[in-house]
Amino acid sequence: YEELLQLNDKLFGVAFSIYKGWIWIKTIREAQGMDVEEAMNILTRIGTYADMYDNYLIDKYGRGQAAGTAPTPDHSIQG
C-alpha cells in the first residue's frame, strides 16, 4: 500500500485506491457543471494512468485475484 501512496503523489486529478483487494484508479468530481470536454479529459487521464501502471504493478506484485472478475463498487451511503 505504501507504494500506491507514493505513486499517488505523481498523479494529477486521480488516485489509486483499494477496494475488496483490487487496485482502482478513481477521481472525485461533482457532475454539475461538467462539460463533455472535461469528462473526456478525466476518462482519458484514468485510461492513460491505468495503461502506464497496470503492467508495472502486475510484474512487481503478481495478479492476485486479477484473473477473476472485479467486484462491483458499492456506492450506497451507510448511515
Image: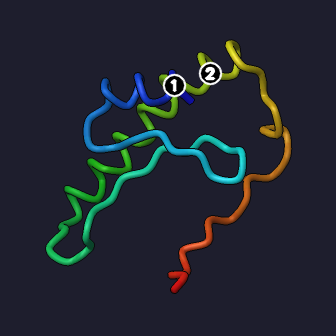
In the picture shown, does residue 3 fall above or below 75? above
Count of numbered marks:
2
Front position in the image: 52 or 4: 4
The residue wearing badge 2 is: 57
Give how far across and how far down residue 34 sits, in percent: 19, 68
Q: Residue at x 36, y 53 (%)?
A: 27
Q: For the residue carrying disc 2, how many other residues have a C-alpha within 10 Å: few (<14), some (14-19), or many (20+)?
A: some
Left or right, 37 with respect to 3, comes to left
Q: CA distance from mark 2 to mark 1?
A: 13 Å
Left or right, 38 with respect to 77, comes to left
The residue wearing badge 1 is: 2
In the picture shown, does residue 49 fall above or below 77? above
Front position in the image: 7 or 66: 7
Left or right, 24 with respect to 47, comes to right
Quarter of the figure with residue 66: top right
Q: Residue at x 43, y 31 (%)?
A: 49
Outermost residue toward the front in this view: 79
Q: Amino acid at mark 2?
A: Leu
Q: Nearer the viewer, mark 2 or mark 1?
A: 1
